[in-house]
Amino acid sequence: MRIDLLRPVVKAVLVLSTFSVASLTWANDNFQQCVEDLQDKARAHGISNTTVDQVLAGVNYLDRVIELDRRQPEFTTPFSEYLGLRVTEQRVQKGRELYRQHQDLLQRVTRETGVPGHYLVAFWGLETNYGSYFGKMSTLDSLATLACDPRRSEYFTGELMAALQIIDSGDIEAERMQGSWAGALGHVQFMPSVFLRYARDADQDGARDLWGSIPDAMLSAGTFLKGIGWESGLRWGREVLLPKTFSYQMAGLGQTKSLAEWREFGLTDAFGRALPDVDVKASLLVPAGHEGPAFLVYDNFDVIMRWNRSEFYALAVGHLADRIAGAGALQNPPPSDSPRLSRQIVLELQEKLIANGVDPGALDGILGPATRKALREYQHQKGLVADGFPDSTTFAKLGVAFPQQEQQKQ
Ligand SMILES: [Ca+2]
């Protein structure tokens, strides 16, 4: 009986494996042709014959990389969850420990680049949990796969050429060059083009070793941040308190005011004290809506976003850096009951917004700038707090069931 039950499963497996062998053969033929083209490009790029013939010739196509590249986020993750997963007590404690342990090195990097050590350690913590995972994909296989895929072929061909140049320069052997599926490398997850331009040999052993040398990784991170515009002596931003009545139309990275102007609108620091009297331009961010924390962010926040184009990421770097330097948790933490929003639910919101005469942009199930703007307009019309953040009151008003957090958690 057991055998009878198993038979259909075995059949299905056979059918599947025949199919994937066929598609693999197809992919392989195309891939081999593509690799030959890449070899020509690499030669034209000045990559050595040894690297072209012995390293690039042996790259493998990785289905998994294409799968990961095509993956669509299923949910809009709320800020509370994003921050909660990245700035944990454990990560703060470990960061403080490493900050003390490497203080001579970090001071040296600050002298040379202007970037304070607590920021360097914060990037390190967010990128690889302080070097505890670099990613295990062969960088050359990943980049060759992505270079041979039409979606972003040009970009990844450039990164592949940079990776081959790194190998030519003798910084690392091809077999040790491992990282994320998209080609990011080492302790601070540099893309190869960033590595070529900004990696430094701090311990002077003759190699820029972003995998094995913490001094190299920290000096390289500082050099990169300086290169993309880090202003020494300036913070990333700070948590602030807003007055009871406040026009959330002023929020968003697109608009800046001087600290003096923000003071006049009634903003204080997170403890209710006057904002410092310095000549700094700042934007206001409310990543969890009016019930969550508010931040004023300065020019260095934009620099962090040049490392990774995500407001949540940049807020996490700034907050983790503050915590490593000794600050406490946020005065006004984001509400912990914010649910994840599935694409289906965001789509429902978008449809209801249209029915109410405001334009959420493309009907794509993504809570992007156009949808947030439409939410603000709708909230304003209905006399709600117009923060563009879909809280339970806004859901109720629009007639969409508010997702229960319990059902979202696995
Ligand atoms: Ca070195």
Image (cartoon, rainbow, N blue to C red):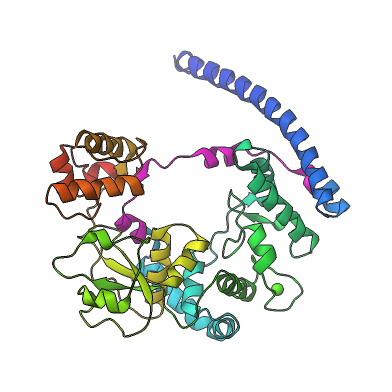
Provide residue 240's location: percent of width, then percent of height: 26, 73
Tell me which corner region of the image, top left, top right, bottom left or bottom right, holds residue 5. top left
Provide residue 316's location: percent of width, then percent of height: 39, 65
Task: Reply above or below: 304 against 16.
Answer: below
Residue at 84 percent of width and 49 percent of height: 43
Residue at 30 percent of width and 76 percent of height: 328
Nearer to the camera, 170 or 294: 294
Q: Horizontal placement of 142 versus 265: left or right?
A: right
What is the number of callouts on the image?
0
Provide residue 280's location: percent of width, then percent of height: 38, 78
Return the residue found at the far right.
49
Q: Horizontal placement of 405 versus 207: left or right?
A: left
User: Is residue 75 among what the camera can see?
Assistant: yes
Magenta-drawn stretch contains 240: no
Task: Reply above or below: 104 against 23.
Answer: below
Nearer to the camera, 368 or 123: 368
Span of residues in magenta: 56-84
Q: Horizontal placement of 332 versus 71: left or right?
A: left
Q: Quadrant of ligand 1?
A: bottom right
Tell me which corner region of the image, top left, top right, bottom left or bottom right, holds residue 11. top right
**Figure quadrant of the N terminus:** top left
Provide residue 172's location: percent of width, then percent of height: 74, 62
Magenta-drawn stretch contains 73: yes
Nearer to the camera, 324 or 113: 113
Task: Reply above or below: 13 against 306.
Answer: above
User: Is residue 125 among what the camera can see?
Assistant: no
